[in-house]
Image (tube, rainbow, N blue to C red):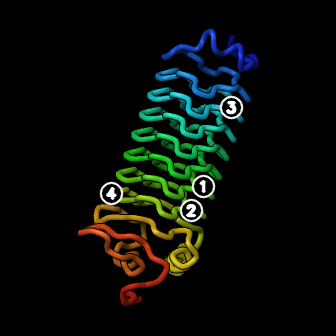
């Protein structure tokens, strides 16, 4: 069964919740609405697989190859995706609350409106990923790569971005933030006093480009609304 290409229609008779599909070849497989809760898909080859609205909650997808896979509105709550390759994948409105995405490659992935509450994105690669409107409240993005990542209207309340790499510019990161705030990459991003920022992206400086929406909560605006901090 494993190590060969499996056509989409052949999958349905034998897929069951908790099924072991380690290293399965599911490239291009058509699995819309599939019930794969708790399935073991470690190291599975799923390039361009169609998994929109599939139930992959609590599934084990560690090291799986999901390049350009379609996972729109898929349920990945509590799934293990450590070291998973999701480059260019479409995760629009996917449910990833509590998922473990440690060391996952999400470069160029589309995560618009995704629910990532409490997700673990430790050292995840999010280069040029689109997280517009994503809910990252309480998520861990420690050591994550966020170069050219779109975070418009994203919710980062209580998120931990300590050690995250936000661009290649090093000491020029402050000027970069001002550019992002004006051009819209970070427009309307929501954050709170419990959000942990990396390096020079201090709460004091970010607050200069934010409006307080509730006690201890802010939203990035297009222009500075407070006097710029010294330095």
**Residue position for label 1:** 129
* Image quadrant containing the C terminus: bottom left
Q: 84 or 5: which is nearer to us?
A: 5
Q: Quadrant of residue 68?
A: top right
Sequence order check, earlier mark of 1 and 4:
1
* Separation (CA) of disc 4 from disc 2: 19 Å
* Residue in view at x 45 percent, y 76 percent: 221
Mark 3: few/some/many CA within 10 Å (<14, 14-19, 20+) = many
Q: 48 or 153: which is nearer to us?
A: 153
Q: Position of residue 159 (x, y in %)?
A: 37, 56
Label 3 secondary element:
loop
For residue 49, which numbered disc appears in the image? 3
| Residue depth check, mark 1 versus mark 3: number of the one nearer the observer | 3
Mark 4: few/some/many CA within 10 Å (<14, 14-19, 20+) = many
Label 4 secondary element:
loop
Q: Position of residue 3 (x, y in %)?
A: 72, 17
Q: Position of residue 177 (x, y in %)?
A: 51, 75
* Separation (CA) of disc 1 from disc 4: 21 Å
**Residue position for label 2:** 150
In the rendered image, the vertical position of residue 8 relative to residue 175, given as above or below: above
**Residue position for label 4:** 158
Q: Position of residue 79 (x, y in %)?
A: 46, 32
* Residue in view at x 66 percent, y 15 percent: 11
Q: Quadrant of residue 120?
A: top left
**Lateral position of residue 207 relative to residue 172, left or right:** left
Sequence order check, earlier mark of 1 and 2:
1
* Residue in view at x 67 percent, y 32 percent: 50
Q: 121 or 210: which is nearer to us?
A: 210
The answer to the question of whether label 1 and label 2 lie on touching residues, with beta carbons closer than 8 A, is yes
Sequence order check, earlier mark of 3 and 4:
3
Sequence order check, earlier mark of 3 and 2:
3
Mark 1: few/some/many CA within 10 Å (<14, 14-19, 20+) = many
């Amino acid at each position: 069964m494993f190590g060969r290409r499996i056509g989409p229609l052949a999958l349905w008779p034998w897929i069951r919740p908790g099924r072991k599909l380690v290293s399965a070849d599911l490239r291009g497989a058509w699995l819309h609405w599939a019930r794969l809760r708790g399935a073991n898909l470690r190291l599975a080859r799923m390039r361009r697989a169609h998994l929109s609205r599939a139930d992959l909650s609590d599934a084990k997808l560690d090291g799986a190859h999901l390049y350009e896979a379609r996972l729109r509105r898929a349920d990945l709550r509590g799934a293990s995706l450590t070291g998973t390759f999701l480059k260019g994948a479409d995760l629009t409105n996917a449910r990833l609350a509590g998922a473990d995405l440690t060391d996952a490659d999400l470069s160029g992935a589309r995560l618009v409106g995704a629910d990532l509450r409490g997700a673990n994105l430790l050292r995840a690669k999010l280069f040029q990923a689109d997280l517009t409107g994503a809910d990252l409240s309480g998520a861990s993005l420690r050591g994550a790569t966020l170069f050219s990542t779109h975070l418009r209207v994203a919710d980062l309340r209580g998120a931990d971005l300590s050690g995250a790499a936000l661009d290649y510019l090093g000491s020029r990161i402050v000027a970069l933030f001002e550019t992002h705030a004006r051009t819209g990459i970070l427009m309307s991003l929501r954050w709170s006093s419990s959000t942990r920022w990396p390096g020079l992206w201090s709460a004091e400086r970010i607050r200069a480009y934010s409006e307080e929406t509730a006690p201890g909560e802010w939203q990035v605006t297009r222009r500075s609304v407070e006097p710029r901090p010294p330095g």
